């Protein structure tokens, strides 16, 4: 007979727990009891603390083209013709070579034309960060942001892919990837006067992952990007949906072009082959120094921008009864513009150094080697990389030409004012060094 009261108590506890699970969870003092404090100040109610926000931007280089197409992407007839062409022993000397060539990525052949190599256009991936600053209030969230990136010495030509944690826009496709989860645990204990100590726990968990392509009518956020002011400004607008906080990163691929002081027009020189088929150095008269006209950003120039943010924050003043937001007292606050200066493209990327041969001794000490070719004025012997400049110097040291001022159809020397071009001499070769300048 002593077990009956215990069973009745347990039944009452379980019934109370079930009834509790069907009603909204009462979380007393959810905001009132929360205190916010920053270093050097007194703790205050979080309802009186409104966070601020700011935006920043950085950029990284993006390959101009990255095709993932291979032979398998070709139609049947084109694939058969492609295999037949690759089966030529000059291209594929074995079955292994043929398989390797078929698996290789398809790409357009390099242009062999004499057009200008334009280095004032930049393919970049911008990472735009919006973050909260100042006093932190966990109940508040950013509901709308407008980020304007205004270039100082460049313009936006176009943008391609735009992505956030919730949305990706690429060639008209909008994709939403969203995850939600919730877990609740409720415990009930009998009064202290119960004959036997007992407790009951009810636990429920729910999670779902959603990946869908949404129409414009159903979105986790509104996301748009526009190029304004004749390309000077890129504006990214975001408006969050329910329970979406817009702090975080936005990634966008853009094409920018330099519009500052007059671009620098020069030549980049290269040597395609230093040795013959037998591995012997080519004689100076047969060495070909190729010239490629280049339009580039002047030395020492970086690409700067102003990043301006206008945001709307949902500031919770009170709302302690439930987790639901309908009983919250909220202030929707829209900020004044917040501006930060950033360097979008560093000098080493916008105007990378050229490399040449510089005399370290003798009369032309401190001067760079110049080159004069038929039909063209004298110019600095500029190479794209240190390795190319060093390789040319290695050739001169190895061959030791009798007249190093004559290489192929080119003439090498120093332009020392007030005279003209002074030819490079054999005695001056040991004093040459490859350095990061060519003028």
Image: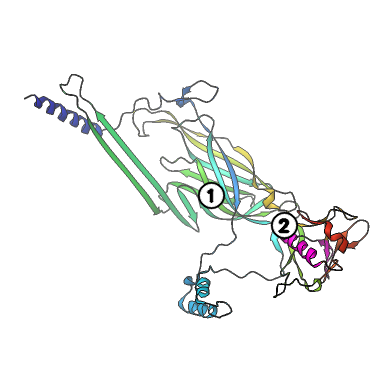
Label 2: how many residues lie within 10 Å, few (<14), some (14-19) or many (20+)?
Answer: some
Question: For numbered disc 2, what is the local secondary structure?
Answer: helix
Q: Nearer the viewer, residue 143 or 275?
A: 275
Place of residue 11 in the rendered image (x, y in percent of width and height, measured from the top left): 15, 30
User: Which residue in the rendered view is the most extreme toward the right?
Assistant: 418
Q: Does residue 227 sit above or below 405 in this rendering?
A: above
Q: Nearer the viewer, residue 158 or 5?
A: 5
The quarter of the displayed image where residue 420 is located: bottom right
Is residue 424 at least partly visible in the picture?
A: no
Q: Which residues are magenta?
A: 370-399
Place of residue 129 in the rendered image (x, y in percent of width and height, measured from the top left): 55, 43
Colouring style = rainbow
User: Which residue in the rendered view is the most extreme toward the left?
Assistant: 1
Residue at screen point 45% across, 77% down: 76
Q: Does residue 315 sit above or below 362 in this rendering?
A: above
Foreground disc of the pair 1, 2: 2
Question: For numbered disc 1, what is the local secondary structure?
Answer: strand
Left or right of 197 on screen, residue 418: right
The quarter of the displayed image where residue 194 is located: top left
Q: CA distance from mark 1 to mark 2?
A: 33 Å
The N terminus appears in which quarter of the rendering? top left
The residue carrying mark 1 is 251
The residue carrying mark 2 is 386
Q: Is residue 4 magenta?
A: no
Q: How many labels were placed on the picture?
A: 2
Label 1: how many residues lie within 10 Å, few (<14), some (14-19) or many (20+)?
Answer: some
Q: Is residue 376 magenta?
A: yes
Is residue 244 at least partly visible in the picture?
A: yes
Q: Nearer the viewer, residue 103 or 143?
A: 103
Looking at the image, tell me whether mark 1 or mark 2 is earlier in sequence order: 1
Place of residue 208 in the rendered image (x, y in percent of width and height, measured from the top left): 34, 47
Place of residue 429 in the rendered image (x, y in percent of width and height, measured from the top left): 84, 60
């Amino acid at each position: 007979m002593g077990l009956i009261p215990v069973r009745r108590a347990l039944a009452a506890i379980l019934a109370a727990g079930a009834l509790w699970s069907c009603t909204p969870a009462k979380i007393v003092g959810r905001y009132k009891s929360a205190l916010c404090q920053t270093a050097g100040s007194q703790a205050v109610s979080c309802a009186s603390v409104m966070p601020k926000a700011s935006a920043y931007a950085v950029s990284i280089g993006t390959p101009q083209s990255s095709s993932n197409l291979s032979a398998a992407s070709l139609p049947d007839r084109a694939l058969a013709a492609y295999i037949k062409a690759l089966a030529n022993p000059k291209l594929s000397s074995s079955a292994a070579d043929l398989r390797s060539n078929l698996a290789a990525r398809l790409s357009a052949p390099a242009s062999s034309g004499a057009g200008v190599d334009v280095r004032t256009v930049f393919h970049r991936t911008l990472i735009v960060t919006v973050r909260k600053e100042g006093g932190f209030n966990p109940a508040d969230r950013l509901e709308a942001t407008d980020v304007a990136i205004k270039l100082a010495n460049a313009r936006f030509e176009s943008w391609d892919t735009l992505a956030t944690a919730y949305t990706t826009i690429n060639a008209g496709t909008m994709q939403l990837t969203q995850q939600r989860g919730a877990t609740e645990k409720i415990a009930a204990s009998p009064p202290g006067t119960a004959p036997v100590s007992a407790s009951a726990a009810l636990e429920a968990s729910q999670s779902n992952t959603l990946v869908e392509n949404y129409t414009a009518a159903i979105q986790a956020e509104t996301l748009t990007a526009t190029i304004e002011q004749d390309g000077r400004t890129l504006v990214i607008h975001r408006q969050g949906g329910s329970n979406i906080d817009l702090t975080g990163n936005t990634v966008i691929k853009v094409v920018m072009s330099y519009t500052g002081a007059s671009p620098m027009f020069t030549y980049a020189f290269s040597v395609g082959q230093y040795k013959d088929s037998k591995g012997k150095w080519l004689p100076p008269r047969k060495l070909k120094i190729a010239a490629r006209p280049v339009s580039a950003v002047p030395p020492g120039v970086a690409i700067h921008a102003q990043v301006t943010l206008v945001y709307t924050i949902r500031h919770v003043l009170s709302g302690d009864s439930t987790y639901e937001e309908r009983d919250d007292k909220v202030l929707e606050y829209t900020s004044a513009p917040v501006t930060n200066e950033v360097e979008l493209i560093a000098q080493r990327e916008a105007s990378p150094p050229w490399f040449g041969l510089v005399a370290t001794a003798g009369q032309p000490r401190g001067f760079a080697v110049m080159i004069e070719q038929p039909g063209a004025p004298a110019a600095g012997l500029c190479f794209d990389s240190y390795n190319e400049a060093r390789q040319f110097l290695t050739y001169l040291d190895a061959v030791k030409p009798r007249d190093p001022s004559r290489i192929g159809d080119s003439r090498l020397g120093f332009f020392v004012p007030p005279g003209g071009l002074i030819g490079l001499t054999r005695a001056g070769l040991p004093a040459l060094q490859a350095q990061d300048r060519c003028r």
